[in-house]
Amino acid sequence: MLPASYQTLVAAFLIAGGFLACFFGYRSFKVVLAVFGFIMGAVVASSMFGSSNTTPMVIAAIVGGIVGGGLLLAAYFVGVALVGAGIGALMAQLIWTQIEGDPHPFVVVLFSVAGALVATWLQRYVIILGTAFGGAWAMLLGVLALNGDAGPMKAAAQGDMFVLSPLTPAPGQTWVLA
């Protein structure tokens, strides 16, 4: 995760990208894919360095973001299937949070494949709903970060790379799933 000193810049990027995705996602699907690919690439790449290695972490975040954005932009033709697979994995996780424990990897793969198949069948609606929910989540994260919410800040300070996951809300904040 990026150091807290970059919080405002990242929060503004999340809010802007989230707004674009939430309200203009279908019209600008290629741009939304590039923005979210950048965000995902930056998160993954920056998590490979400790919080004390600020310069390599920032460089890795920028390079990872460019690579992630390029990959999702290149995957435009399969982007809908990827969104559907992500929604399928999300559904598996949501079901298993009610059961307690983590789903078996085979179940996640099965839900992901089913989600990809349904997404290609209902392409337009999946793009609209997927970008709306993804954009809303990004805006929510950005606003929480700008307001100095203690939960994400504490997790970021501990080096928890899953701060961006909506499926692991802080204790007492189960409203996030809704």
Image (cartoon, rainbow, N blue to C red):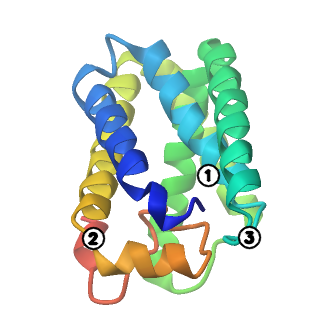
Residue visible at 33% across and 16% down in the picture: 26
Q: Image quadrant for the N terminus?
A: bottom right
Which label lies toward us, 1 or 2?
2
Above or below 131: residue 53? below
Say whether disc 3 or disc 1 marks the residue closer to the N-terminus: 1
Amino acid type, callout 2:
Gly
The residue where tag 2 is placed is: 148
For residue 158, which numbered disc appears in the image?
Answer: none
Horizontal and vertical percent for residue 170? 37, 82
Q: Is residue 142 above or below residue 14?
A: below
Q: Which residue is mark 1?
A: 43
Give the residue type at disc 1: Val
| Nearest to N terminus: mark 3 or mark 2 | 3
Q: Residues within 10 Å of mark 3 (few under 14, many from 20)?
A: some
In this rendering, would 57 be left or right of 92?
A: right
Across and down, in percent, residue 18 comes to 32, 37
The residue positioned 73% from the left and 49% from the top of the image is 45
**Tag 1 secondary structure:** helix
Residue drawn 59% across the image and 74% down it: 160
Looking at the rendered image, the disc whose residue lies closer to the viewer, 3 or 1, is: 3
Which of 2 and 65 lies nearest the eye of the viewer?
A: 2
